Image (cartoon, rainbow, N blue to C red):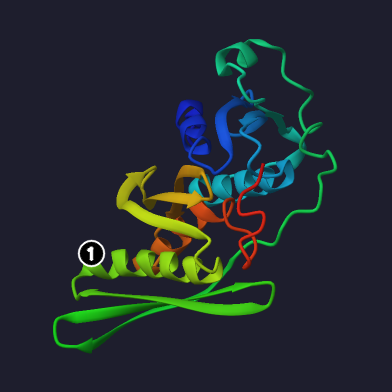
Amino acid sequence: MPSLDTDQIDALLETLTGVVRARVRPSANGEGLTEIHVLSDGEIAPKQIVRNIETLLKTAFDLSIDHRIVSIAVLKEGADVDDIEREAPEAPGREARAETPAKAPRIVFRKVRVVQEEELKCTAYVELELDDVIFEGSHRDTDTPRARVFSSARAVIEALEYLAEKKMAFYLAGIEQRSMFQRDVLVALVEGRHLRERRRMLGTAFVQDDPQDAAVRAVLDAVNRFVTRPNGNDGHRS
């Protein structure tokens, strides 16, 4: 097994939702990791960040880790990232194992289908679930491979606005496919507004067999920390 490129791993971990900065330490033989230090923006609970890291490393590198090697520090508002990095990190796993408050339920992706209902046009239908409530969004566009991916992502936006009863607004600013570590990744940029708050959110998903499926997952990865409940209450996490 070739030695791991820790710079590449750092960069990939920093694409995860909630991760501001990541630094990993390789094992003596260079084939594993002994420490993973993460600086979080506080958007996601530490335990969820650890699970996301485990999944990403397994998917991208077929690398399994012990969750206890992960330490997470939360960046306080107004703090300087470089100043915090100069401080000594917590013992691995200490922050990640800390008890966290109960979290609002997350939106679950059920299925996506894209159909050609008329000549040269396609419609994407996305089915999502929250708190045992199933809801659907759709978007119609020209029937091309790229438009099918965009329509799938845009259908998520339509479903989310229905879910939030128009108390939140979303805009799909862009969706692009990139190649990382010999894998195709879809990156979605979503802009959201709730009351006076505006956010730009970035989400990613690996492309497996279906790029439409990846488009839905990338948008959900971006917005799941912003949307929580159908009535629009607690529309973002502090």
Total numbered labels placed on residues in the image = 1
Q: Is residue 197 above or below residue 144?
A: above
Counting from the top left corner in percent of width and height, residue 48 is at 69, 48
Q: Is residue 176 above or below residue 93?
A: below
Label 1: how many Cα within 10 Å (few below 14, some 14–19, many 20+): few
**Residue in the image at 39% along x and 42% along y:** 181
Disc 1 marks a residue whose amino acid type is Arg
**Residue in the image at 65% along x and 43% along y:** 49
Residue beneath disc 1: 146
Counting from the top left corner in percent of width and height, residue 145 is at 22, 69
Residue 66 visible in image: no
Counting from the top left corner in percent of width and height, residue 11 is at 46, 32
Residue 30 quadrant? top right
Counting from the top left corner in percent of width and height, residue 75 is at 65, 26
Q: Is residue 118 above or below residue 26?
A: below
| Mark 1 element type | helix
In-front residue for pair 79/187: 79
**Residue in the image at 74% along x and 54% along y:** 103
Locate the C terminus and report the quarter of the image it occupies.
top right
Residue 160 visible in image: yes
- Considering every residue shown, the one lying at the far front of the view is 196
**Residue in the image at 19% along x and 76% along y:** 143
- Considering every residue shown, the one lying at the far left of the view is 120
- In the image, taking residue 31 as reference, residue 48 lies left or right, namely right
- In the image, taking residue 205 as reference, residue 80 lies left or right, namely right
In-front residue for pair 16/182: 16
Q: Is residue 227 above or below residue 180?
A: below
